[in-house]
Amino acid sequence: MATSVRMSVTVYGVHKSAEVEPRLLLVHFLRETLGLTGTHIGCDTSSCGACTVHLDGEAVKSCTVLAVQADGGAVTTIEGMAQEDSLHPLQEAFWEHHALQCGYCTPGMIMAAADLLERTPRPTEAQVREGLAGNLCRCTGYNNIVGAVLAAAEHGRRGAARRPASTTPT
Ligand code: FES
Ligand code: FES
């Protein structure tokens, strides 16, 4: 039996600490240890992007990262994107542009798109398509997703609304 190790992360500003097995994947840590089930598992083989989160400001597929690799880091999941009384601009744009059907891919799409717009605030359509190439959608045909990301960029609604880190321990 693997020996557990203590690790901690800051999840949208809140300090979280837990004992985990060294082999535990970050996506399972988020979903099962922290109960943040907004991050989805589509393939577990790094193909679909449904598990995309931000780790220290970069989009990562959380099924490709061990939880202990995030020790001491800052994680943002889809649960941390909306503000108290309003959706994140990308969430609004996905809603307005009908950029989802079943919604399974949507959390990962939004986290990948937020990272894209953080790095490239005014992307071309080709840059959006390239930026989301690691995220698969089985429903929409992608056009509305690309349109939503372009609309968010056009309105200056880039995904810069990441929560400032706080040091509140739990
Ligand atoms: Fe991580 Fe598919 S579940 S890429
Ligand atoms: Fe169903 Fe993308 S909306 S997989």
Image: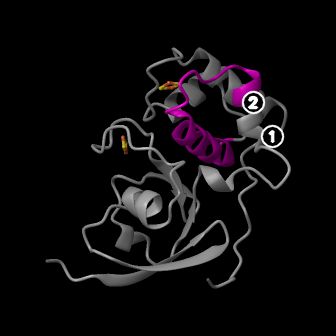
Does 137 sit left or right of 2 as displayed?
A: right
Q: Looking at the rendering, which quadrant does residue 136 occupy?
A: top left
The location of residue 81, given as percent across then percent down, is 69, 51
Pick the front one: 118 or 88: 88
Instruction: Give the amino acid at mark 2.
Output: Ala
Residue carrying label 2: 93
| Label 1–label 2 contact, CB within 8 A | yes
Screen quadrant of the N terminus: bottom left
The location of residue 95, given as percent across then percent down, is 73, 27
Disc ID at residue 74:
none
Please count the marks in the image: 2
Residue at 50%, 48% in the rendered image: 39
The location of residue 73, given as percent across then percent down, is 51, 73
Disc 2 is placed on an element classified as helix
Does 92 sit left or right of 16 as displayed?
A: right
Pick the front one: 145 or 98: 98
User: Chief secondary structure of the magenta span?
Assistant: helix
Structural crowding at the residue carrying mark 1, measured as other residues with C-alpha within 10 Å and reported as few (<14), some (14–19) or many (≥20): many
Quick check: is the Cβ at mark 1 less than 8 Å away from ligand 2? no
Q: Looking at the rendering, which quadrant does residue 93 occupy?
A: top right
Q: Does residue 13 lie above or below 64 as drawn?
A: below
Screen quadrant of the C terminus: bottom right
Where does ligand 1 appear, by image quarter?
A: top left
What is the span of residues highlighted in magenta in the rendered image?
A: 94-120
Residue carrying label 1: 157
Earlier along the polypeptide chain: callout 1 or callout 2? Answer: 2
Residue at 21%, 83% in the rendered image: 3
Instruction: Give the amino acid at mark 1.
Output: Arg
| Inter-mark Cα distance, 1 to 2 | 9 Å
